[in-house]
Amino acid sequence: MIRIAAVGDVHLDPSTAGTLRPALNSVARQADLLLLAGDLTRHGTLDEARTVGEEFAELGVPVVAVLGNHDYHSDQQDEVGRVLAAHGITVLEGDSVVFTIAGLSVGIAGVKGFGGGFAGRCGTAFGEPEMKAFIDHTTAIAGRLRRALLALDVDVRLALTHYSPVTDTLRGEPLEIYPFLGSYHLAEAIDEADCALALHGHAHYGTEHGTTPGGVRVRNVAQPVLHSAYAVYDLEPRDPHRRE
């Protein structure tokens, strides 16, 4: 069994330093990996990033993150990523990382993601250049996720994003803002790569459980949804060495 701990939208700053650490100290006893689904800071400042780094450092399990829109707010996202990396956190954006857990290779591919909406109720690259740029950006990010996932030669693939790939996990949010909470292009990439699990944040008033059109489990791990320091998801992948 593979145990994945995950949380997003912790929105830490120096005034909240240490608030999660007591609960995080037990994560190594409960999980094999900890995945962070973005919006780790409030405004994307370096002081906030250092707070995040210290909160999630040296937990006894690998910690993998993507950034969220809050982490981009101060236009210092690259520096934020470097601060987190200096604390031992792997930050993904269009790339991946692989671990061996319970004798299986587990690959995580991650991107921030972006908005755009969902099939039947989505923006299209038509009309004004601003609208084209908006949709081109979301499709480009989804393309990076697709390439990173498909490049993984592993037993188990996981997708980590900040924005949602499905509407299931947005239920509870106002319908009017769905196009700003995610994109179906992310789900297409996740389904094409036959992922075992997809994790995201961003939707504070959403729902934890969802599924892609292709049947991949999706979990909204925004902390306001979880009401805890993290959630743990158990995966029981098919033994790749077993003959059917």
Image (cartoon, helix red, strand yellow):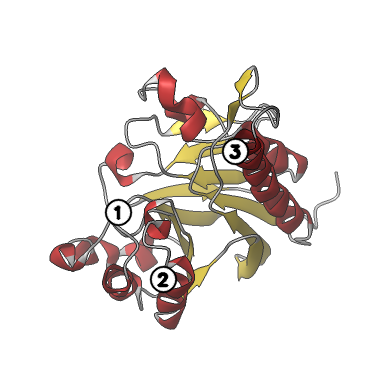
Q: Residues within 10 Å of mark 1 (few under 14, many from 20)?
A: many
Residue 203 or residue 128, whichever sits in front: 128
Q: Is the residue 100 above or below the residue 176 in the image?
A: below
- Residue 44 sits in quarter: bottom left
Which of labels 1 and 2 is toward the front? 2
211 left or right of 81 in image: right
Q: Whole-percent x and y of residue 196?
A: 64, 45
As drawn, 90 above or below 35 = below
Dot 2 and dot 3 residues touching (CB under 8 Å) = no
Q: Dot 3: few (<14), some (14–19), or many (≥20) neighbours within 10 Å?
A: few
Q: Residue at x 39, y 80 (%)?
A: 87
Where is residue 151 drawn, in percent x and y?
Answer: 78, 60
Q: Residue tagged by mark 3?
A: 130
Query: Please, what secondary structure does the residue beneath circle 1 have?
Result: loop
Q: Residues within 10 Å of mark 2 (few under 14, many from 20)?
A: many
Upstream in the sequence, badge 2 or badge 3? 2
Task: Find disc 1 in the rendering and name its residue.
Answer: 10
Q: CA distance from mark 1 to mark 2?
A: 15 Å
Q: Nearer the viewer, residue 131 or 163?
A: 131
Q: Identify the residue shown where x is 57% and y is 36%.
A: 165
Q: Circle 2 is placed at which residue position?
A: 80
The amino acid sitting under disc 1 is Val
Kind of residue at disc 2: Val
Q: Residue furthest bottom?
A: 86
Q: Is residue 62 left or right of residue 129?
A: left
Residue 44, above or below 118: below
Please identify the residue farthest to the left as the structure is shown: 15
* Residue lying farthest to the front in this orientation: 128
> What residue do we see at 42% from left, 19% from top?
175
